[in-house]
Amino acid sequence: MAWVAGAGILVNGATALLFLRGREGDINIRGAYLHMASDAMVSAGVVVSGLVIWWTGLTWIDPVVSIVIAVLIFLQTWGLLRESVEMALAAVPRSIDSDKVWDALRALPGVARVHHVHIWPMSTTETVLTAHLVIPAGHPGDAFLDTTRAMLKGRFGIGHATLQVELSGAEAGDAEVRGC
């Protein structure tokens, strides 16, 4: 049993190492990494508990090691579950500070007000933004939009931005409408 579990440590550990590099940027890769790392951890638990039981005869070691492994797996995957639920609910990704995005949009030349800003994950690697920019002087041209999109991508990692330019923003009323 320990030999087979030892082989499991090697195979699952090596496979987890293949996913190690990309795990920070993609929830799918992180899920695969955690799955393989957990399998390696389970195999290690089997080896340890099997050897301890064989040497000591203490059979209660097996359920204790199983519980410890289950708790460790739960703790490792809790963040993955939370991030998956947030993505399913189209919440603002944790890596983006929506207040800073609002501030950056407000600071653009000619922008008097910003409203109806929405930020959500399009996929595990791409974030989307829509926003209304009130520019009383009129549409500043495509170069302004291109520069704004490049700023959003460079500073906040927002890969797709749809910006609506308005002259008055009357539909928003006197206060900014915040929604992310």
Image (tube, rainbow, N blue to C red):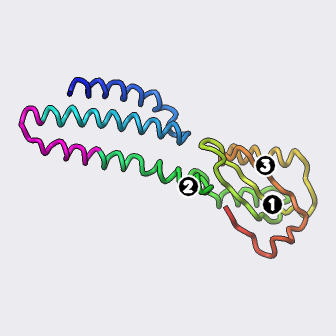
In the picture as drawn, the residue positioned furthest to the bottom comes out as 174
- In the rendered image, the vertical position of residue 70 relative to residue 8, given as above or below: below
Q: Which residues are magenta?
A: 53-69
Label 2, label 1: how far apart the Cα atoms are: 24 Å
Percent of width and height locating residue 123: 63, 44
Check contact, mark 2 vs mark 1: CB within 8 A.
no
**What residue is disc 2 on?**
86
Amino acid at pointer 2: Glu
**What residue is disc 3 on?**
148
Mark 3 residue element: helix
Is 40 situated left or right of 172 in this image? Answer: left
Q: How many other residues sit within 10 Å of disc 2, few (<14), some (14-19) or many (≥20)?
A: some
Amino acid at pointer 1: His
Observer-nearest residue: 4 or 68? 4
Label 2, label 3: how far apart the Cα atoms are: 26 Å
Is 5 situated left or right of 124 in this image? Answer: left
Q: Quadrant of the N terminus?
A: top left
**Residue 86 magenta:** no
Percent of width and height locating residue 87: 58, 52
| Mark closer to the observer (3, 1) | 1
| Mark closer to the observer (2, 1) | 2
| Mark closer to the observer (2, 3) | 2
Observer-nearest residue: 164 or 69? 69
Identify the residue at image location x=41%, y=31%: 16
